[in-house]
Image (cartoon, helix red, strand yellow):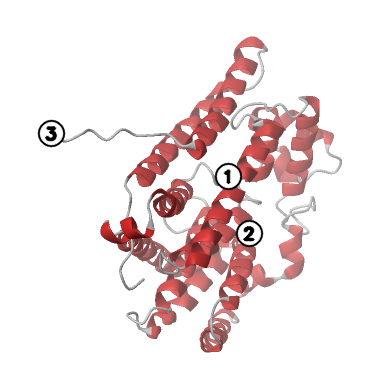
Amino acid sequence: MNKRKVVKFDKIDLLLLVLFLYGFIMAFVRYYFFDEGIIGYAINDIQLILFGYLTFLILKQLELKTDEIKKILVFFFISIMINSFYIIYNAFVLHSFERLGGFFKNPNQAAEAIVMGILILLYFVGKKSFSKWWLGLLPVMLIAIFFTGSRGALIGLLIAGSYFLLQNSRRMLFRLSAAGMLILAFVLPFNAAMETLDLNKLMNRFTSENIESSGGSGRIDIWKSGLLLGKDTYFTGVGASEYRAYHHHYIRKIPDAYITVLNYDLGLHSDYMSMLVEYGFIGLLLYLYLIYFLFYRLHQIKREKELDDLPTLFILIFISMFIQGMFQVSYILPMYWLFIGLGFSLVKNRYRYSKKDLYSKGIINANS
């Protein structure tokens, strides 16, 4: 008689459950007992988080083999490659030089996905079974990032890419340098793409400069108003996604605030600011612990070298993802939970079984 498998929650599962449940409870309490906030904002985000959390739990329980994880990464890469070509098609054929996201509604989210695709590409190109000619796709993906206009993606790619270069040989550095020259040959004639490389504009995207003079994004103004709200609520948390309900009032307390941020009910544009203001100081600490735990476990596996060098790839992806989380709210996105789930699946398999069990279950190969 087959025994039915029981899903067991570990401390990370419970931590995430408590964290996001607290955000919803705080939104509910403030709305029904203090007549503050807009409960619809919280309900919308909690639905997205719930679906993401279930994806995370399923991936952890599947006990995926490394080959199965790699297949998922390949399918993800193919989808992102298609989107990169679509972005370039819109730019060069349809002559659309606005910020482009392809099949993504939000260009920043498209850029984050492309960065992950680039890191996956670099990982597989380093394998003997993959042709180095696949590096020819690198310029396409980088040009697509430029057309998204995402500064956070460029910062994340720069830091994760630097870590990658430290882990690889001079030959790989040479290939990447050659690819970089090819990218410049494509990009230089197009002012719309090159605007993304303007360092002054890059910095101005995060200031309160006027839209007519700088094109800045006003994130710092939003973060300042968020801190004022957090201070007034003693950083106990106003509830999931509830800053938007207070934005109209608090942004007007910021002198010379950027015009656009005055006219819309905007979110906090940062995972960390969102945690601090909407989930409270304790929520931010729990979130930072999650990040620390994930990196700590992946580094442990990386040193043992028993699961191929797949942990290195996930370290690169999470470096990029958590850096981009400084400039956008990413924990409501499906791909966020996909990679968190795959990362913890990798960690769970290593620490649940002995090395002998890992081989016998096929989670790692004998030649890993």
**Which residue was labeled with disc 3?**
1
Q: Nearer the viewer, residue 50 or 38?
A: 50
Give amino acid for label 1: Leu
Label 2, residues with CA under 10 Å away: few <14, some 14-19, many ≥20: many
Task: Check disc 2 and give the amino acid type.
Answer: Gly
Label number found at residue 152 = 2
Is disc 1 surrounded by few (<14), some (14 to 19) or many (20+) residues within 10 Å?
some
Q: CA distance from mark 3 to mark 2?
A: 53 Å
Q: Position of residue 99 (x, y in %)?
A: 56, 60
Q: Quadrant of the N terminus?
A: top left
Q: Tell me how far mark 1 sits from mark 2, CA to CA.
A: 21 Å
Q: Is residue 271 above or below residue 253?
A: below
Q: Position of residue 352 (x, y in %)?
A: 40, 48
Quadrant location of the C terminus? bottom left
**Residue depth check, mark 1 versus mark 2: number of the one nearer the observer:** 1
Question: Is residue 207 rendered to the left or right of residue 287?
Answer: right
Residue visible at 54% across and 57% down? 318
Name the residue at the top extreme. Answer: 33
Work out whether residue 212 can be spotted. yes
Q: Which residue is mark 1?
A: 290
